[in-house]
Amino acid sequence: MKIKKYTVLLSAILSVGILITGCSGAKTASTTGNTQASDSALPKEIRLGYFQSPNGELLAKGEKLLEKKFPGISIKYVQFDVGRDVNAAMASGSIDIATIGTPPGTTGIVNDLPYKIYYLHDIIGSSEALVAKNTSGINSIADVKGKKIATPFGLTSHYSLLAALKQNNISENDVTILDMSAQDIIAAWSRGEIDGAYIWQPAQSKLVSDGGKVILSSEDVAKGGAVTGEFGIVNNDFAAKYPDVVKAYIDILDEATKSYKTQSDDVVKTLSAELGLSAEDTKQAMNQISVLDKSEQAKYIGTADNQGTLPQILKDTSDFLLTQKAVTTSPDIETFKKAVRNDLYN
């Protein structure tokens, strides 16, 4: 199976200028501080799209760091399950800042969506993995032939699954790959409709606890050259109007990520509440990704003098997506260099 195309959907959204307050499956929540912002340089509202990923941004949300920094601004959180919905929301102008995975983010850049990258939240390790039922007969990646494997199409997990098959010389045609959301995967798993799934946390832990086992992870796939991660994107107009707000949010993420790395009881408690996992499962999920604070961004985001490695990762991802016919072209690396806002770190 091939990764779904987004070009037609995104072009339609852009051409008719549909304004949406969320996307299918998106959950929204707004909070406001007790004082009013008097600075006209500040927005009245920040609309922030996020994933339920065990990273520093989710901790910042749980600790209400953005609300504390800007008590007079209404903070609207929009939860997304898949990156294609983030792209649709960005295309329609209904969110200002968001998190997105490398494949859908690359797709957005290729299609010239109105956003730039400002932060790399995490490099995905074992937090995304191929999980198989104990009764499926799958004990290695070679055993997936003839099996039904579910994953959300067009996202990091799908990218890693296809890369794992390619790295192990397994044809996609030998596997029935099903497009399902994380919640649908959990339901299909319990009904015995699938043999396995390539999925992230917290769904991964739920499958393992329900008679599953991890076969391989994105950490293993990355060793073969297919690196995946989650990065922060900001709407171009929002960044142009409120660059200091974006810089302040970078500092908030830095604070949260440094706190995250301590794995203190308070940190684990906050993330457990956000993820809906036990403290033990939350700690496990935290140890399955590599989170990056501000000092570690230069390696990937780069500086004014030195380009980081992220543009090449995006270019490699774009080339792969082209082979899957998920994009119609794979632009040169200059396109991806221009998509990274390392000037926000000056």
Image (cartoon, rainbow, N blue to C red):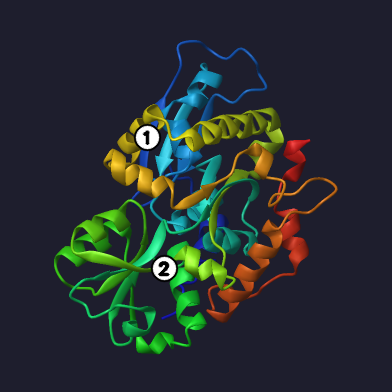
Q: Judge by depth and name the residue closer to the eye, 62 or 267.
A: 267
The residue that appears at 25% across and 55% down in the rendered structure is 206
| Residue occupying image coordinates x 64% and y 63% | 314
Q: Is residue 134 left or right of residue 150?
A: left
Quadrant location of the N terminus in the rendered image:
bottom left
Of 206 and 25, the residue lying toward us: 206
Q: Is residue 253 left or right of residue 31?
A: right
The image shows residue 316 at horizontal and vertical percentages of: 64, 70
Q: Nearer the viewer, residue 144 or 338?
A: 144
Q: Secondary structure at mark 2?
A: loop
Q: Count numbered badges in the picture.
A: 2
Q: Name which residue type carries label 1.
A: Val
Residue 269 location, quadrant: top left
Q: Amino acid at mark 2?
A: Phe
Label 1, on which residue? 268
Residue situated in front as seen by the camera: 231 or 202 = 202
Pair 2/1: label in front: 1
Return the x and y of residue 236 as percentages of the image width and height. 66, 44
Calculate the distance from the C-alpha at mark 2 to the C-alpha at mark 1. 30 Å
Give the residue at the far left of this rendering: 191
Which x, y percent locates residue 155?
A: 46, 63
Residue 132 lies in quadrant = bottom left
| Residue ID for mark 2 | 153
Compared to residue 12, the image places residue 285 above or below, namely: above
Q: Is residue 200 above or below residue 1?
A: above
